[in-house]
Image (cartoon, grey):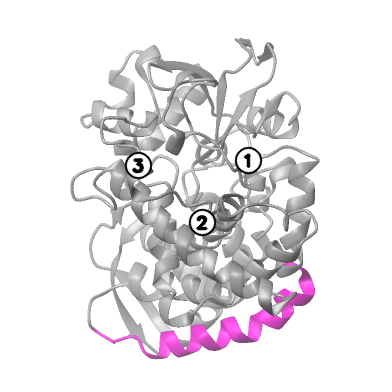
Amino acid sequence: MSDVRGEQDQPELVEFRSPEQEQAEAGRDVPAAHAMALEDINPLNANLFSENRWQDHFARLRREDPVHFNEIESAGRYWSVTKYDDIKKVSSDWETFSSAQGITLGFPVASNAPVFFQQSSPAFISQDPPGQTAQRKTVRPSVAPRNLARLEPLIRQRTCDLLDSLPENETFDWVDTVSIELTTAMLATLFDFPFEDRRKLTRWSDIVFAIPQPGGVVESQNQKRDEMMECVAYFSELWEDRKKRGEGTDLVSMLVHGEATKHLGAANHLGNLLLLIVGGNDTTRNTMSGSVYALNEFPDQYDKLRANPGLVQTLVPEIIRWQTPLSYMRRTATRDCELGTKSIRKDDQMLMWYVSGNRDEDVFENADALDIERPNASHHLSFGYGVHFCMGSRLAEMQLRVLWEEILQRFERIDVQEAPDRTFSSFVNGYTRLPVVVTRK
């Protein structure tokens, strides 16, 4: 395939560190927020998330410095936007705050970073209108109300079958057994992906934003690159297959035959496909896991839900707010401007911390607590805001709703046995392991 370079052409990447990797390695022992000088606080550090210690750092920034400046050698200048209203301002103004340079903290504009790290072949989430609008429209039918209505019986049947197969009075990992299995099966359906290979989708999703570290998801940038090239090769075969088949209703076919996307090369297709994989896998699976963990952390809310299963309807947006499966999104300033009282320079990176906006006390009362009857829970920022509002939001909500409707019919309780293992990332706010025991009715 022409887009895939031969092994001899692949650059050596081990000596390079992405900005998030640099921060993770530099700050394994991050002090408590109150013990730090304000200018030293940098919420990008993945250790804060893997240790579940991010809350106080953002609370202090919201109080004292809601548009907070940091600068590091690998990334240059960037700002943490931590208040709800400021995040909406940045999200709403795509002409001033562009997505075209990427959605996670990256190397400075026009840097000499390796090609592997640079934002070539962007997905539509890393574009601005009108290109973003046209490409997004290509795949929107997959999550249109009519298709969601068609998918719900399948989602429910798979959920029922899986829940019925769970062991009772025996500890198992909820993340792998339930959350990953249900979301990956749904992705395989949406992509018309070979079902026996569906766990490859999970693996590729995990790799996209993984920070290389010993014993981690990937251990080096070379490994990360090589496995992504395997992903390109696999999907290239699917694209050729879909071209031969003609138009279809799966996501790969929509991209291959869509007017706004059919002219694109394989690397461009991969950008969109990885976006759809991560959006459909990481976000939903971590909210499914987060729902079990949160209800154990707030047992009064669990009791309330068990007493009134109809509260599933309000549980769903509140869990999505409380969990916030993707911590932030980046924009890049296209001109000198101001946000709050701060002077933003052209090419400064803006990190919109959804995980902080969703805990903004000026918008959500007692924001750190789970409240399954919270009246404004649906105002959360977990799906973004503006032109990049999550296209699959309704599908994610439906999967979570169906899961808990079926859980409440079968189980007295799902009890967490020990603290979860969490994703080593400041971008994906998730879980890698959650040991539980279920008690059937």
Name the mark nearer the viewer: 2 or 1.
1
Instruction: Depth check: give the residue in front, 398 or 259.
Output: 259
Instruction: Depth check: give the residue in front, 118 or 2.
Output: 2
Query: Residue type at mark 2?
Result: Val
Secondary structure beneath dot 2 equals helix
Q: Position of residue 398 (x, y in %)?
A: 63, 71
Q: Which stretch is magenta?
A: 143-169
Q: CA distance from mark 3 to mark 2?
A: 18 Å
Question: Closer to the N terminus: mark 2 or mark 1?
Answer: 1
| Residue drawn at 59 percent across, 43 percent down | 121
Q: Position of residue 89 (x, y in %)?
A: 71, 29
Query: Residue type at mark 1?
Result: Ser
Quarter where residue 54 is shown: top left
Mark 2 neighbour density, 10 Å: few (under 14) some (14–19) many (20 or more): many
- Which label is found at residue 49? 3
Q: Is residue 248 left or right of residue 20?
A: right
Question: Closer to the N terminus: mark 3 or mark 1?
Answer: 3
- Which label is found at residue 278? 2
Magenta stretch: dominant secondary structure? helix
Reading the image, the residue beneath label 1 is: 126
Secondary structure beneath dot 3 equals helix
Question: Closer to the N terminus: mark 3 or mark 2?
Answer: 3
| Residue drawn at 62 percent across, 63 percent down | 314
Instruction: Depth check: give the residue in front, 142 or 321.
Output: 142
| Residue drawn at 36 percent across, 42 percent down | 10
Quarter where residue 148 is shown: bottom right
With respect to residue 218, does 307 lie above or below?
Answer: below
Mark 1 neighbour density, 10 Å: few (under 14) some (14–19) many (20 or more): many
Quadrant housing the C terminus:
bottom left
Secondary structure beneath dot 1 equals helix
